[in-house]
Amino acid sequence: MLLDDVIAILSDSKGSLTDALLKTKILLRQLGHKELVAWVNSELTGYAKEDEIPDYRQVHTTPHANVILNGWQYKDTLLPQSTLSEELRKNVTELNINSSISTIEEQIKKYHEEKLGLMRPLSPDYIPSLIKGLARDASILSAWCEIDMTEVEAILIQVRSRLLDFCLELKEALGNASEQEVPEKAANIDTPGMFQTIVYGGTVVIGSTNVQVNNKQGDIEGLLAEVGKLGYDKKELEELRKAVEADTKPDIREGETSKWYMNALKQVGKGAIKVGTDVVSNVIIKALEHYVGS
């Protein structure tokens, strides 16, 4: 069944989100709800400038510059923001990611494999305001914003989690219907309402980059303590312990740790965890990175 194919792709952390979205597009048409394809199309092709960008595609950025002071050049200097107006501060610290899912997947792959992050150049028009926070004789050669790649990766997590929750709910509602029986059974299901609630109605908390994660390399108890702050119970934390110990290098993208991670995100979607998915994903990713020592 096509629905089972989509669930299988989404349940595999290495499964292509692009493939899952393409199959979902076909599935929604089979169900007689092509009006729901708009979100799928936007994720596949990217959002236009005039489109309303979902909250989970809003990420944080930090302003940097190459600075000259007293004859010395200081490369990649983090710029202060205290002297910026509220509007300008928002322009240099917030960014809507409107790229297609396939582009984001490729960017995240490069980030993990080659440590290549993302940045956006800042217009020279910004420099007079940015330089106010520096020493009097300082000058800025070039300025840019570095993009928080953890939040970019969280976009993939959000899309995968929301779409998977929708498909699982739909699967449960359809029961054991065969491929041929799906359209008839679907006629008695509020698919649009289900889609609206799960895909558009997920809770997202912006600003998770301020979350502090302080566990140390190789400290399993410290890892569990940090994840436990999110609200996961003792049983779930013990399952995390088993997953981490079973993997040579615990990672959210593969192995037992990946399986635990996907289940952890489902708990957010069900309301069992009271913070947003981006907070959960950031804390778990950072805690695992600290544990592994990367």
Image (tube, grey):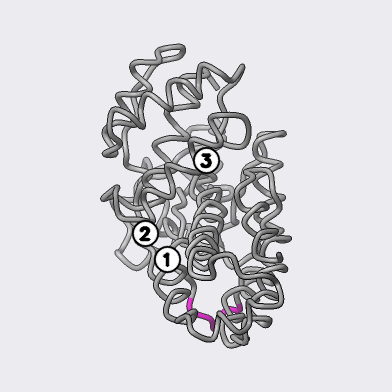
Mark 3 vs mark 2, CA separation in Å: 36 Å
Q: Which residue is mark 2?
A: 204
Residue pictured at 61% horizontal, 48% vertical: 118
Helix, strand, or loop for circle 2? loop
Amino acid type, residue under disc 1 in the picture: Asp
Residue 6 screen position, x and y as percent: 66, 60
Depth check: give the residue in front, 15 or 190: 190
Depth check: give the residue in front, 45 or 233: 233
Q: Quadrant of the N terminus?
A: bottom right
Badge 3: few (under 14), some or many (20 or more) residues near its Cα, within 10 Å?
many
Magenta span: 48-52
Helix, strand, or loop for circle 3? strand
Residue 78 screen position, x and y as percent: 45, 40
Tell me which corner region of the image, top left, top right, bottom left or bottom right, holds residue 253: top right
Helix, strand, or loop for circle 1? helix
Task: Report if residue 97 lies within the magenta region.
Answer: no
